Image (tube, rainbow, N blue to C red):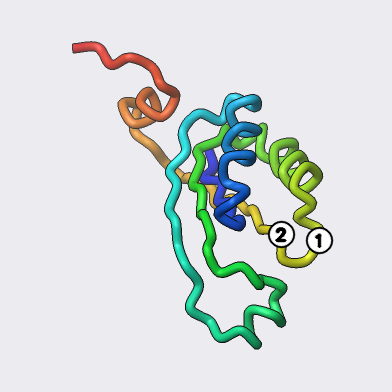
Amino acid sequence: MKILITIIDRKMCTRVLKMFEEQNVNFNTIVHGKGSANSELLQYFGLAETEKSVIFSIVPKQETPALLGKIYELFEFSRRGTGVAFTIPVKSIGKKTLSLLKGEKMEE
């Protein structure tokens, strides 16, 4: 498993989540933020819009390369200032937590 972190302009959040749903990425947590850097620094990094959504998603390790490719292609992340996506490996996870993340029903 990996945690996929996607940082985008807030107005793109719905489109990204729709694509995740189509790709069966069903566990997502969204945090809305607002940048506090000065405009010169934002301009340098190509981040003119300061209202961002940060989406944390749980994805299977073997599916991350294809999913990252699709994100970068569909949302043109290769263009400066459109967004960024990266993964962090999950080293261990409990059986109950894994079942919860997969959306499986817990036995009583």
Q: Which one is nearer the viewer's eye here, 75 or 88?
A: 75
Q: Which one is nearer the viewer's eye here, 57 or 82?
A: 82
Name the spot of residue 69 as percent of width and height, x first. 77, 43
Secondary structure of the residue carrying tag 2 is: loop
* Quarter assignment of residue 17: top right
106 with respect to 45 (left or right): left
23 with respect to 4 (left or right): right
Q: Which residue is mark 1?
A: 79
* Quarter assignment of residue 106: top left
Can you say which quadrant of the picture contains the C terminus? top left
10 Å neighbourhood of mark 2: few (<14), some, or many (≥20)?
A: some
Q: Residue at x 50, y 38 (%)?
A: 58
Q: Residue at x 56, y 69 (%)?
A: 50
Q: In the rendered view, tell whether residue 11 sits above or below residue 103.
A: below
Name the spot of residue 19 as percent of width and height, x first. 65, 33
Report the Cα–Cα distance between label 2 and label 1. Answer: 6 Å
Q: Residue at x 66, y 71 (%)?
A: 47
Q: Residue furthest top?
A: 107
Q: Are marks 2 and 1 in contact (CB under 8 Å)?
A: yes
Q: Which one is nearer the viewer's eye here, 44 or 25?
A: 44
Name the spot of residue 35 as percent of width and height, x first. 50, 72
The type of residue carrying mark 2 is Thr
Q: In the rendered view, tell whether residue 90 sits above or below residue 19.
A: below
Q: Residue at x 81, y 44 (%)?
A: 73
The type of residue carrying mark 1 is Arg
